[in-house]
Amino acid sequence: MNTFAAIIDSASVVVCCGPGGVGKTTTSAAIGIDAARRGRRVVVVTIDPARRLADALGLPGGLTGEPQRLPSEPQAGEGEGDGEVWAMMLDTPAMFERIVRRYAATADQANRIVANRFYRNMSGALSGTQEYMASEALHELHDDERFDLVIVDTPPSRNALDFLEAPGVLTRFLDHPVFKLLMMPTRTGFKVLSVATQPLLRAIGRVVGSDVLADAVAFFQAFAGMEAGFRQRAETVTRLLHDDNTKFVLVASPNHETIDEAMWFAKQLKQQGFDFAATIVNRVHPRFGDGTSADAIKRALTAGNRGDDALASIWQNLAELRAIANSERQQLTPLIERLGAGVVVEVPLLSTDVHDQQALSLLATHLFAVS
Amino acid sequence: MSNLKPLTELTASNLVIVVGKGGVGKTTVTAVLARAAADSGLRVLAIELDGKSTLAELIPDIPVRHISAADSLEEYLFEHGFKRIAKRLAKTGVIDVISTAAPGIDDLVVLGKIKQLERSGEWDLIIVDGPAAGHAVTFLTSASGLLDAVRSGPIRTQAEEVLAMLTAPERCKVVLVTLPETTPVNELLELAAAVGQRVGVSCSVVVVNQVDVGRSLPDPDEIAFGRASVGVADAIAAARFRRARQAIQRDELTRLTDALAIDQLHLERVGSARLRSQDIVRLAHGLLDQETGA
């Protein structure tokens, strides 16, 4: 067993993070499939997965907001073999509504909130809401008896840190002075009308329109009394993210920009005390032996001089691919040095695109290869 | 509609917005288009929205402006009755409040700022490195969405003006970026459908980034390697690998062409994991040569 497998085996939550387009979703699925092969009961939460991934997982109907068990079980591997893989897609509005209903004092209060237009905007468009709900889903699934490993594929954020700050996003929102102002009337018995006479709110009303402002005021009046529950929940989720068995896996690809971003993110994770356990570098060009690019060019020239263009092109190709691999290596070196003793797993660019279960298994083989 | 000079047609409009999923190389494409336009004699301004500033390094002599939602909203508030308290409001995060009350307003003020630059007459072409990830559609639909939600006032006027810019093909064009691989092509097709149906903006060109333009390799199993033995297995494996990747590329380009009747521009894959400004020059001139050759 290699160190990466040991990390996954000791984890109860794995958070896959990293820049967009590096293969986070595919990697999450591959980690899940392999963990199940070693006997874990896994649920993978993905964010808006590409259609083909659902197909690859054997769920042609697509993923839903509820966990579904994959029909084709991974083959039993080392020993246990009674693992399971479940997959679900994050349904942000449904998740948000569930939480509102949990903390509402009455069904009527919950109904008033979910029918409110400001609430609808918030559950769909408040920046950070998707991350917030992903962290909530993580917590719910962690408590779910059916699973002993939760793998979360984080949303492609505008800001990579959104997920780490996600649990507090709503309470921070509620702490905002403007909202405090909006919530005041219910406490002191004022009416909506008097809110609208506040100069600040009047000004906001001029920008967004008075009916939009009235929606916001109605939302905060309906929400009053629920803040404490939300605050407590945020603390619980934050604790889970800092738990010893919660591991952060950073996914990157071997080009300058994403490596830069990955190094920055790794630093943030460490500074904030998260257990940053491993880095996966996806789609690294294979090296094709330990010869140099120059060797291959020499062979190409010799063949070319003999007039054997076909052979020359074969050697030329080897030279080109080695040059790409070297260039990627150059970009990767600072990352590997910076991470010191940290686990770095390189997954080669495969000669097929990963969109079926066979390819996913192949990917898993590379991830968990004994090194 | 096939166009013999997609690049010329593209750069003839005032504003080009480059969109695509994460990792496909939006910033590279923005830089290459800016370079090609600037080297054709146009006064070009490149705009980056959120995220890191990498454009300046790729196109060192072309002006690059950073436009953030926070700054634009602050500016907007300042100009619309908030005056001096605008700064304090922006600092305390009032943007979240306002943009939740009226979703899309943060995007709209950014587009409003871009429109202001477009109207200034200072630039022949403004190229925007579009918003990251799945944010492109909400960014482009912000104006039409707000028109439905807001009945009157300055926001409505702003939304009307932005929408007029976005939907006028002679003023604004959208460039979609993808890679010649399965998942990026799927995502591009989804994005193209969403942009066309929900935004009503004209998607004028698809740029396929990182295209392997190398000629097709012979089957290594049919090659006589002569007396050579060292490295032969590596050369065979490398040829098989390249052929397999090229086959994927061919299939995906065919699928893209069949599914989407939009002109394609291809950017050659650069054999380096870190792009530099000279790579951008080479790619841009490659595009210009393609066009003059056509």
Image (cartoon, rainbow, N blue to C red):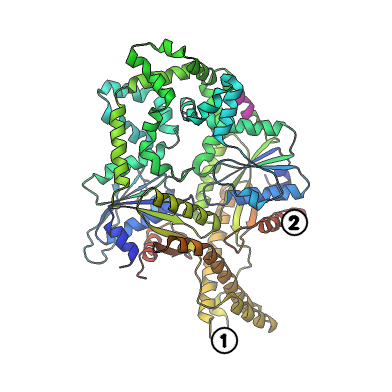
Residue B83, image x, y percentages? 59, 21
Q: Residue at position x 57%, y 33% from top?
A: B71
Q: Secondary structure at mark 1?
A: loop
Q: If you read the primary sequence from the N terminus, does the residue marked by circle 2 or circle 1 appear first? A: 1
Marked residue chain, label 2: B
Which residue is disc 2 drawn over?
Answer: B289
Q: Nearer the viewer, residue A28 or A188?
A: A188
Query: What is the span of residues highlighted in magenta in the rendered image?
Result: B157-162
Q: Amino acid at mark 2?
A: Asp
Residue A169, image x, y percentages? 39, 35
Label 2 Cα crowd, 10 Å radius (few <14 / some 14-19 / many 20+):
few
The majority secondary structure of the magenta stretch comes to helix
Q: Nearer the viewer, residue B115 or B51?
A: B51
Circles 2 and 1 in contact, beta carbons < 8 Å: no
Q: Amino acid at mark 1?
A: Ala
Is residue A130 among the parts visible in the rendering?
yes
Q: Is residue B131 left or right of residue A36?
A: right
In terms of image quadrants, where is residue A173?
A: top left
Q: Residue at position x 52%, y 27% from top?
A: B88
Above-or-below relation of A312 to A330: below
Evaluate whether label 2 is on the same chain as label 1: yes
Which residue is disc 1 drawn over?
Answer: B228
Q: Does the stretch in magenta take in B159?
A: yes
Marked residue chain, label 1: B
Q: Is residue A146 left or right of residue A254?
A: left
Residue A6, image x, y percentages? 30, 62
Q: Nearer the viewer, residue A131 or B80?
A: B80
Q: Residue at position x 66%, y 78% from top?
A: A309
Q: Quadrant of the C terminus of chain B?
A: bottom right
